[in-house]
């Protein structure tokens, strides 16, 4: 009991620290510019004369920061309702709790502004076409409307960020749930998905903090308006978002027809755990669709254990866990939150693959899983059985059996946290955990 109470206090303290970090955005950002102004003041007078436009540019940057900062209180006024007031109904206030800001927090807030560009602005459409569209197209191909009632097809999007990919999937009639671990993302996505009512309602400056590789100051001050669409799924769709650690929230087996991951699997210190969990929660015959690089966010972080296998090794892990890889492409050009006007352009050669969790078919004609019909082959409407697992139970050696038993024990020990979220309602889930690097 004491452990639960301490855990709840720790979670609340972290939540309030995130709010405090959001509130510090303006002052901390202006302090950085003031530092640059002080550096400028130390230069010889003729240098300052030649840099007079630079001095004026810094003043203009301040105006952009002020405009960004005005969006933050609009978002935060709804923050305590995200989790059914779990952090604001115990009678304590901010002043009663010693709350500071997070050391990496300003970078997190700046990242949210860039993510708003990527997910919810017209300028971000190019990146979304690169990264989201192949996944959406594959889901539509796997579950054609003439053969499936899409409202009964459950699609999970872990690492949903600000929710655009999950929103697009739900808008096509699927029952889609996004899951996110990063509180900075969750707070802003909640506002966008529940309270933005008009197209292009807000203006922000996503790259105002990028002082390098600008041809002109105006490029640094590139603005975007959001949202580019009303974030409202069609009435017949089922859309929700949950908060919490993917590994802790999703523990029930055979729940999802499809898991769609975009720039996600490298967010784990151990990518194998993610792959095992995805396999565990998919229904037999379900598909996993992935697109992204292998940046491995925990690599080189102090006091963090991390493994960084190559894609070749990841493919072997995928097969060993039991997936059958049906499609695989490498070298897909993808960008992430890039200023298209910057002199420096980061571009990933991402990997894209589609894997299926095998099913056993006794009659050789397909599988009926409750009320959901999976078709292993859709060419000409003919049903064909998927390949059987390579090993039968009798062929398992002692190490295989020990591994299977360990997995069962781990799964049993995991906290049961059924992901629940009412459509367009509060985000709820398996508790709020400290956000990892993302």
Image (cartoon, rainbow, N blue to C red):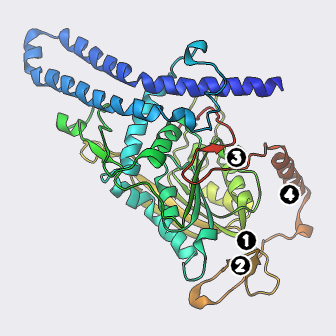
**Element type where label 1 sits in the image:** loop
* Label of residue 227 in the image: none
Report x, y in % for residue 423: 57, 54
Q: Mark 1 points at which residue?
A: 358
Real-space CA distance between mark 3 and mark 4, rounded to the nearest whole angstrom: 27 Å
Looking at the image, do the residues carrying marks 2 and 1 touch, with CB atoms under 8 Å apart?
yes
Which of the two marks, 3 or 4, is nearer to us in this view?
A: 3
The answer to whether any part of residue 299 appears in the image is no
Mark whose residue sits in front, 3 or 2: 3
Using the numbered discs, state the Cα–Cα distance from disc 4 to disc 2 in whole angstroms.
23 Å
Residue 74 is at least partly visible in this image: yes
In percent of the image, x 11 and y 25: which residue is there? 53
Q: Nearer the viewer, residue 277 or 176?
A: 176
> Which of disc 4 and disc 3 is earlier in sequence?
3
Q: Label 3 belongs to which residue? A: 249
Left or right relative to 392: residue 167: left
Q: Which of marks 1 and 4 is nearer the N terminus?
A: 1
Of the image marks 1 and 3, the number of the one nearer the N terminus: 3
Q: Earlier in the sequence, mark 3 or mark 2?
A: 3
Instruction: Tell me where residue 379 sits by quadrant.
Output: bottom right
Q: Name the residue under label 2.
A: 386
- Neighbours of disc 2 within 10 Å: few (<14), some (14-19), many (20+): many
Q: Which of marks 1 and 3 is in front?
A: 3
Judge the density around disc 4: few (<14), some (14-19), many (≥20) Cα neighbours within 10 Å.
few
- Looking at the figure, which quarter contains the N terminus? top right
Q: Residue at x 61, y 52 (%)?
A: 422
Asked if the residue at tag 4 contacts the one at tag 1, i.e. Cβ–Cβ closer than 8 Å, the answer is no
- Expressed as whole percent of the image width and height from the top left, the position of residue 89 reads 64, 27
Q: Which residue is more in the foreground, 376 or 312?
A: 376
Q: Earlier in the sequence, mark 2 or mark 1?
A: 1
Pointer 4 or 2: first along the chain:
2
**Residue under label 4:** 400
């Amino acid at each position: 009991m004491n452990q639960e109470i301490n855990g709840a206090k720790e979670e609340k303290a972290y939540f309030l620290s995130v709010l405090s970090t959001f509130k510090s955005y303006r002052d901390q950002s202006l302090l950085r510019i003031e530092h640059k102004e002080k550096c400028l003041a130390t230069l010889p007078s003729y240098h300052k004369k030649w840099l007079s436009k630079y001095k004026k540019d810094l003043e203009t940057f301040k105006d952009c920061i002020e405009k960004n900062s005005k969006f933050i209180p609009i978002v935060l006024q709804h923050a305590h309702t995200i989790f059914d007031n779990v952090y604001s109904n115990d009678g304590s206030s901010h002043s009663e709790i010693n709350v500071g800001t997070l050391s990496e927090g300003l970078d997190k807030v700046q990242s949210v502004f860039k993510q708003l560009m990527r997910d919810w602005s017209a300028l971000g459409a190019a990146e979304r076409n690169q990264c989201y569209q192949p996944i959406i197209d594959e889901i539509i191909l796997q579950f054609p409307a003439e053969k499936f009632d899409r409202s009964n097809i459950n699609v999970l999007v872990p690492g949903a960020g600000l929710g655009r990919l999950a929103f697009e999937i739900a808008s096509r009639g699927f029952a889609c749930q996004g899951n996110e671990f990063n509180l900075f993302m969750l707070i802003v996505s909640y506002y966008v998905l529940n309270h933005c009512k008009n197209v292009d309602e807000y203006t922000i400056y996503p790259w105002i903090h990028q002082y390098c590789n600008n041809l002109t100051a105006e490029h640094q001050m590139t603005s975007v308006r959001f949202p580019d669409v009303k974030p409202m799924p069609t009435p017949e769709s089922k859309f929700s978002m949950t908060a919490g650690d993917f590994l802790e929230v999703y523990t029930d087996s055979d729940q999802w027809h499809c898991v769609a991951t975009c720039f996600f699997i490298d967010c784990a210190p151990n990518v194998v755990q993610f792959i095992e969990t995805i396999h565990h929660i998919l229904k037999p015959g379900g598909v996993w669709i992935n697109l992204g690089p292998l940046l491995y966010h925990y690599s080189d972080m102090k006091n963090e254990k991390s493994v960084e296998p190559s894609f070749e090794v990841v493919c072997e892990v995928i097969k060993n866990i039991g997936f059958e890889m049906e499609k695989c492409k490498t070298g897909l050009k993808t960008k992430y939150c890039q200023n298209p006007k910057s002199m420096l352009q980061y571009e990933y050669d991402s990997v894209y693959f589609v894997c299926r969790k095998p099913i056993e078919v006794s009659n050789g004609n397909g599988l009926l899983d409750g009320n959901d019909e999976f078709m292993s082959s859709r060419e000409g409407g003919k049903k064909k059985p998927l390949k059987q697992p390579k090993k039968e139970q009798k062929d398992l050696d002692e190490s295989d059996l020990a591994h299977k038993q360990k997995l069962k024990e781990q799964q049993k020990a995991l906290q049961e946290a059924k992901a629940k979220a009412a459509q367009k309602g509060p985000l709820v889930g398996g508790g709020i955990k400290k956000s990892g690097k993302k």
